[in-house]
Image (spheres, helix red, strand yellow):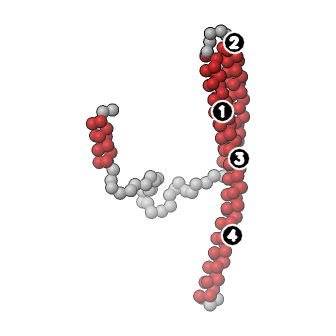
Amino acid sequence: MAWDEWEQLKADAAHRQSTRMQLNSIPVEPGGGGPSSYGDLKASNTDLIAVGNAARELHKKFDEASDKARLASMSVVDSMKTSDGFELGAAIDHVAVHWVDQVQSLLDASAHIANHLHVTQSIHAKDEVYIEGVISSISTLDKGFDERTTGK
């Protein structure tokens, strides 16, 4: 890209931008003002369990497939090292070692997802109980103030 072309792209972008801040959002529904039909973010236990199960299944299948790939790589490395004149065996061995590291990272991540979802369910259940208690105590206080001001 030439410098002039870059400068023109910057000028075009600056021309399209306004001086006010713009936030990404969901477009307001026609007639607007009321609550969105999209609703609140909700995740049921069924949804969380399904995601957790998928993460565990990914972990299991990837572990099995990567083990086969590791064994095949080791076989090729052994074959290449024993053949005279081939230095490719050391390069394949280097790649295979790093492959094992990357596999372990993915396996750890998929296990972390499943574990995190389980903990999330527990934490949010406790949060719901706490919020419910706080809201009901506010309601009780409001009734007390109402009784005091109305004399009932």
CB atoms at circles 3 and 1 under 8 Å apart? no
Which residue is the site of mark 3? 115
The image quarter containing residue 112 is top right
Q: Look at discs 2 and 4 and give the one toward the viewer.
A: 2
Please tell me whether residue 146 is drawn above or below residue 23 in the rendered image: below
The image quarter containing residue 4 is top left
Identify the residue at horizontal 71%, vertical 22% (top origin): 71
Q: Is residue 67 left or right of residue 28?
A: right
Distance, label 2 to label 3, CA atoms, is 44 Å
Percent of width and height locating residue 121: 69, 53
Q: Look at discs 3 and 1 and give the one toward the viewer.
A: 1
Among numbered discs 1 and 2, the one appearing first in the sequence: 2
Distance, label 3 to label 4, CA atoms, is 28 Å
* Residue 50 in view of the camera: no
Percent of width and height locating residue 39: 55, 56
Q: Is residue 65 left or right of residue 42?
A: right
Distance, label 2 to label 4, CA atoms, is 72 Å
Which of the numbered marks, if any, corresponds to residue 133? 4
Q: Amino acid at mark 1?
A: Asp
Which of the numbered marks, if any, corresponds to residue 101? 1
Identify the residue at horizontal 42%, vertical 60% (top origin): 31
Q: Amino acid at mark 3?
A: Asn
Q: Secondary structure at mark 1?
A: helix
Which residue is the site of mark 2? 82
Q: Look at discs 4 and 1 and give the one toward the viewer.
A: 1
